[in-house]
Structure formats: structure tokens, C-alpha cells
Image (cartoon, coloured by chain):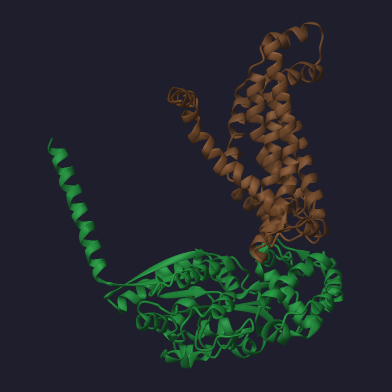
């Protein structure tokens, strides 16, 4: 009996990696997983009773905003992707002083916080702001009827300004890894620039482009300051502004969490895609 | 070697110095002043009120604690006091608290405060109706207002010769001048919220019921659909600005000719040269909401006499004139006429020129009771956008 018991105890001895992993895993569970789960749970609670009322309210009041958020995010991710690839290709293929200088300047926006970008865009894009007055000086715009940019367009401009350099940083890094011999080989069989980009560079750099797009996508969905300071109380606005509104004015965490769940779903969708492609890559590496 | 001993000596001096300071502080009477509100309230407490009061009362150490902006900041103070009560703490940690209106509704229900105001030597200056009832709760004797922050319509007299005297006139003006009135909706700051509250008061004529007496009735909410449909029409001819500051900036840049603003922010912008000095203020009928912040003393405050003395200091005409009006551009918590000798005539004229103390008495309204407040905001989302 005793020997069996002691053996059982001996068997139960923790493998060494458990205590090593414990702090990190515990931290993740406590600080990320649990809040996430509790946010989802709370979105289904009204006065501690299970209910779908929060989602009904989201549907009634905020469905336009959800569509708007999704549209802004998709559009800007696509825009960022296309422009960032173009810049990265330029920096990769034309390595001279000018491109080095440009790529250095291009790193600046990455270090500027969103709140500063928002304030900047706010005064730059205003009806009588810097952009409109400058265009009016050139006679392109009439200040009585200035460009209205506190909307989808202005928001996209702000996001593109901030996110393209970030995407370039990642994508350009990927392009740097591609050996010149591939480009030269393509050229020697007569490939023109567009087909070098689309059929050699981009496919070989697919993984870092996807990483960049996933990061840009989830950052745009989660950004509060830029939409808040640029379009604020306009209709439609973004989910993040609505969440702040529900919490600040109603202390209504139920609906705020339900709105949160909507944005998690939008993000999960890309995260799932990203994970799947990573797993496929890993499998290919193993089998190859 | 020599360097090392010097630095050790320096360290020792520092340590003993700190200990000495600590000792001196320990001997003083502590006054814990807890304030809700934005960071400007912390600045007011730490940089202005505490040093001023300590200079007059050498034995006292005032510590300012800041709980955060908006109703949430007041809620933190309420929860602290409620927890003390539930734990049967004989003496509170807080000497004086500075809170929003909604706090009074919660705290009076739980009996957390003591009546002190009528004993204060500055009580005679308090004429604000907010110091009697607030959000439908009788608070007379329990509160002294620190300031009154008020919303009003700012306008550019170059384009607006006769500012609208009522919401009805404003509606007409907007029809004739599309795109020249701007406010920030209800999600971009409280000046827009206040404008919408004023709209509901004007359209329904039920200010008394919604903001003073209550009770909350669901049928009232259902009756608002036409009120907000009308506002939706109104919104077609205006611009939604990007926040409280957005409205001020748009006025300053001449993008809009009229818009609702917080009066204190307006004057601060003016003083800092960020606002076209031509811009003026008007308070249309039936009025627009504003809100005070109140001093309260917890029921079992450790030094109620000292707490009251602190409040008397802050509500004295001199501090009200120098700090509340001149430095922070709020309307005073005490009656404006009591300040007449204490502030230079030009400043008095500036803040009371467009909107007079009599206007404020009549048209400085309260925000609705909490339930109506939420219902109005949600009705706006449902019907006006």
C-alpha cells in the first residue's frame, strides 16, 4: 500500500517545464485570456441574468457603425497593403541616397502616438484647416465651400499616414531577404517590372505581407483617438467611439462588451486566417 | 576615495533631511481633500487651494487625492464612503470631497454626509438654486458649490447680428443659414449633450419634471419621438464638430458662425489667444444646462471643523474671484454680485457681459435627473441619427 502510494506520489512529480512555464502562462491567462472570456460573458448578461438584450440594442442602435467600422478597416488595410508594397519594392530595387533618406523619414510616423496624429489631422484636415487654406491659396478650393474631410476620406487619410510606414517596415524587411539572383533571373528571361513584382517579389514575401496586413487591420479596428477626434459624434462613427460612449455616459458595460465582441469577431476572422497560413507553412517546412 | 566619502555624506544628509521633513509633516494635522473631475481639478487642489489654505493655517497639511473625470470619478468617492459605512468605520479617511451632482443622489440615499453648509460663514453668499435641490434631491445644507460651469451658445457677431433668443428662433436661423451652426453630437463631449438637453426642455416644456421633481416615467420617453425627429431634421442643416474643442476651433476659424460651448473653456481659449475675441455668448430660452461641483463633508469626517474651515476658505469671495473666476474662468459657486469688489471691473464685465447673473439665475438650467438623462441620450441615438 505504502510503496504504491509513494510511487504514485513520485509519478505525480511535476515535469520540470511546468514550473518554468507557470509564471508566463499564469500571467497570460490572468491578464489576457480571463478578461477576454469575461468580456464575452458579460456581453450576454443584463443585471446578472442571461439575456440577448445587449445584442438587440447593438443591432438597433449601432449596426450602421459596425458596418462603417468594417468598411473603414477593410478599405484602409487594402490601401495600406497596396501602397506599402509599392514603397517597399521601390526601396528594395532602388538602393541609392534618395531612397535611403526617404526610408529614414518614413520611419518617423511609426514613433508618433495616435493621439498626436489625431490632433495633427484635426487641424490639417479641418474645413478652414491647413490643407484647405493652402488649396484655396492656389485657387483650387473655395473656402466658402471647403473640402469636408471629417469623414471616411479624412479618417482614411489619417490611417494611411500612420499605418503605411509601419507596414513598409515589415514588408521591406521581407523583400531584403530575397536574393538579387531571383530578380536577375526573371529579368534575364525577359520579365518586365510589373511581373517581377507580382510574380517574384510579392509571392516570395507573402508571409511578411500577411503579417503586416493582419497587424494593420487589427490596429485600425481598435483605434479610438483618431475617429474620436476626427469624426466624434457624427453618424456613422466607429465601434470604439460607441464603446466609450456607452461606458462614459451610461456605465453600461453590457452593451459596451457586446460591441467589443463584434470587434473581436472581426479580428478573429483575420487571426484565424493568419494562424492557418502559419500552420500550413510549418507543415510544409516539416514535410519539405 | 574622497569622492566616495563626500557622496556618502551627501546621502546621509539627504536621508536625515527627508526624515526631518517627514517628522514635521507628521506633527501637522492632515486634511484629506478628495476630488472628482478632470486633471484640472487635481491641479486646482494641489497647486492652488492646498497651498493657499496651508499658508493661512500653518499647522495643517492638505493632501489632494484625485479620483478621475466625470460621474465615474464621483462614483469612486461614493463607493469609498459606502464601503466605510458598511465596514462600520468610526472615522472616515476623507475630510472634504468635491463631487458632481449625481453623487448627491447616491450619497443622500445612503445617508453618508453631514449638514454643515448653514454653519459656514460663507453660506450667506450662496444663492444658486443647485445648492437647494439637485437632480430632484433636496441637498440644502449638505453642499456648497465650488463653481458653476455653464453651457451657452457662442456666436460670431460679424455674421450673426441678432443671435437667436430661443431654440425656436435658432431653428429658423439654421434653416436660413445651412451649415453655419455646429455642435458635437452626443458622443463628442458634454457641450453637445447639453445642447440636446436644452432642445428637449424647449420642445417638451417639461424642465421641472425632467430635471427637478421627477418622477421617471417610461411614457415620457415614448412621447419624444417627434421631438427627436425634429432634431434629425435640424441636424441636416448643421455640421457635427469634432468634440467640445472642435466646436471652439471651428468658431475661431470661421467654419461655423454659431455653436454651443462650455463657458469656462470659451473664456480660457479667449485668454490664451486661441479664440477670435469678437465671438460672443448668448443663452437662448428656455435655457441650457450647466453643472456645479459641490463640496461635501462625510458624516464621520475626522475634523469637521477643519473641513468646514477649508470650504469657507475656498468659497470666500477672494478665492472665488482670484482662482475660480480669474484663473479657471468658471462662474463662481457663490453669488456673482458678492465678487463685485474683488475682481477688476473689466473682468467682471467680460464674464457677465453677454450672459448676466440674472440670465444665469433664470436660464442656467440643470441637467436632467439621471434616468431621464440616459433616456434622452438613447432616444437621440434611436430617433435623431
Residue B267: percent from left, percent from top: 57, 73
Q: Quadrant of the C terminus of chain B?
A: bottom right
Chain represented in green: B
- How many numbered marks, from 0 up? 0
Against B124, residue B70 (above or below) is above
Against B175, residue A139 (above or below) is above
Residue B178: percent from left, percent from top: 83, 69
Residue B123: percent from left, percent from top: 46, 90
Q: Residue at x 65, y 25 (%)?
A: A172
* Rendered image quadrant of residue B310: bottom left
Q: Is residue B155 visible?
A: no
Against A180, residue B291 (above or below) is below
Q: Hue of chain A?
A: brown
Residue B258: percent from left, percent from top: 73, 72
* Rendered image quadrant of residue A162: top right
Q: Is residue B12 visible?
A: yes
Amino acid at each position: 500500500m505504502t510503496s504504491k502510494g509513494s510511487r504514485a506520489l513520485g509519478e505525480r512529480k511535476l515535469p520540470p517545464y511546468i514550473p518554468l512555464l507557470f509564471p508566463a502562462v499564469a500571467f497570460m491567462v490572468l491578464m489576457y485570456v480571463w478578461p477576454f472570456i469575461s468580456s464575452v460573458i458579460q456581453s450576454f448578461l443584463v443585471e446578472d441574468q442571461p439575456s440577448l438584450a445587449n445584442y438587440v440594442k447593438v443591432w438597433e442602435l449601432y449596426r450602421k457603425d459596425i458596418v462603417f467600422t468594417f468598411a473603414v478597416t477593410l478599405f484602409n488595410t487594402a490601401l495600406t497593403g497596396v501602397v506599402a508594397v509599392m514603397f517597399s519594392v521601390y526601396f528594395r530595387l532602388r538602393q541609392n541616397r534618395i531612397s535611403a533618406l526617404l526610408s529614414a523619414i518614413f520611419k518617423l510616423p511609426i514613433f508618433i502616438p495616435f493621439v498626436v496624429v489625431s490632433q495633427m489631422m484635426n487641424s490639417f484636415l479641418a474645413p478652414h484647416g491647413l490643407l484647405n487654406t493652402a488649396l484655396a491659396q492656389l485657387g483650387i478650393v473655395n473656402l466658402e465651400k471647403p473640402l469636408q474631410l471629417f469623414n471616411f476620406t479624412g479618417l482614411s487619410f489619417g490611417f494611411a499616414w500612420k499605418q503605411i510606414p509601419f507596414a513598409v517596415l515589415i514588408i521591406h524587411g521581407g523583400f531584403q531577404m530575397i536574393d538579387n539572383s531571383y530578380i536577375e533571373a526573371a529579368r534575364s528571361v525577359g520579365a518586365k517590372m510589373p511581373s517581377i513584382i507580382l510574380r517574384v517579389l510579392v509571392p516570395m514575401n507573402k508571409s511578411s505581407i500577411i503579417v503586416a496586413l493582419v497587424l494593420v487591420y487589427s490596429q485600425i479596428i481598435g483605434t479610438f483617438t483618431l475617429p474620436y477626434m476626427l469624426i466624434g459624434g457624427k453618424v456613422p462613427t466607429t465601434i470604439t467611439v460607441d464603446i466609450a460612449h456607452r461606458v462614459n455616459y451610461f456605465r453600461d458595460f453590457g452593451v459596451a462588451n457586446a460591441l467589443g465582441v463584434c470587434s473581436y469577431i472581426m479580428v478573429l476572422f483575420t487571426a484565424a486566417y493568419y494562424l492557418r497560413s502559419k500552420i500550413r507553412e510549418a507543415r510544409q517546412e516539416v514535410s519539405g | 576615495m574622497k569622492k566616495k566619502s563626500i557622496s556618502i555624506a551627501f546621502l546621509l544628509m539627504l536621508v536625515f533631511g527627508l526624515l526631518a521633513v517627514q517628522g514635521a509633516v507628521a506633527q501637522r494635522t492632515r486634511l484629506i481633500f478628495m476630488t472628482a473631475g478632470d486633471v484640472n481639478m487635481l491641479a486646482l487642489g494641489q497647486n492652488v487651494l492646498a497651498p493657499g489654505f496651508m499658508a493661512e493655517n500653518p499647522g495643517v497639511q492638505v493632501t489632494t487625492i484625485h479620483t478621475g473625470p466625470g460621474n465615474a470619478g464621483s462614483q469612486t468617492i461614493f463607493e469609498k464612503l459606502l464601503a466605510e459605512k458598511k465596514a462600520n468605520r468610526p472615522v472616515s479617511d476623507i475630510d472634504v470631497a468635491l463631487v458632481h451632482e449625481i453623487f448627491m443622489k447616491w450619497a443622500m440615499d445612503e445617508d453618508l454626509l453631514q449638514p454643515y453648509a448653514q454653519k459656514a460663514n460663507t453660506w450667506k453668499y450662496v444663492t444658486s438654486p443647485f445648492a437647494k435641490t439637485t437632480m430632484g434631491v433636496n441637498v440644502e445644507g449638505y453642499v456648497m458649490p465650488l463653481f458653476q460651469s455653464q453651457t451657452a451658445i457662442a456666436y460670431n457677431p460679424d455674421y450673426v447680428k441678432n443671435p437667436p433668443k430661443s431654440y425656436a428662433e435658432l431653428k429658423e436661423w439654421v434653416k436660413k443659414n445651412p451649415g453655419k451652426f455646429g455642435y458635437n453630437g452626443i458622443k463628442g463631449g458634454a457641450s453637445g449633450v447639453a445642447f440636446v438637453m436644452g432642445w428637449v426642455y424647449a420642445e417638451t416644456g417639461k424642465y421641472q419634471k425632467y430635471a427637478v421633481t421627477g418622477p421617471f416615467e417610461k411614457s415620457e420617453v415614448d412621447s419624444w419621438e417627434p421631438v427627436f425627429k425634429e432634431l434629425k431634421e435640424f441636424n441636416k442643416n448643421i455640421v457635427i464638430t469634432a468634440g467640445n474643442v472642435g466646436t471652439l476651433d471651428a468658431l475661431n476659424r470661421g467654419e461655423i458662425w454659431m455653436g454651443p460651448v462650455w463657458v469656462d473653456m470659451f473664456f480660457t481659449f479667449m485668454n490664451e489667444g486661441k479664440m477670435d475675441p469678437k465671438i460672443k455668448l448668448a443663452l437662448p430660452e428656455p435655457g441650457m444646462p450647466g453643472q456645479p461641483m459641490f463640496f461635501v463633508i462625510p458624516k464621520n469626517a475626522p475634523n469637521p471643523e477643519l473641513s468646514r474651515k477649508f470650504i469657507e476658505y475656498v468659497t470666500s469671495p477672494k478665492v472665488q474671484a482670484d482662482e475660480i473666476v480669474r484663473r479657471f474662468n468658471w462662474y463662481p459657486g457663490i453669488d456673482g454680485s458678492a465678487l463685485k469688489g474683488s475682481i477688476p471691473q473689466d473682468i467682471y464685465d467680460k464674464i457677465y457681459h453677454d450672459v448676466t447673473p440674472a440670465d444665469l439665475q433664470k436660464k442656467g438650467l440643470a441637467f436632467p435627473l439621471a434616468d431621464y438623462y440616459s433616456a434622452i441620450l438613447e432616444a437621440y441615438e434611436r430617433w435623431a441619427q
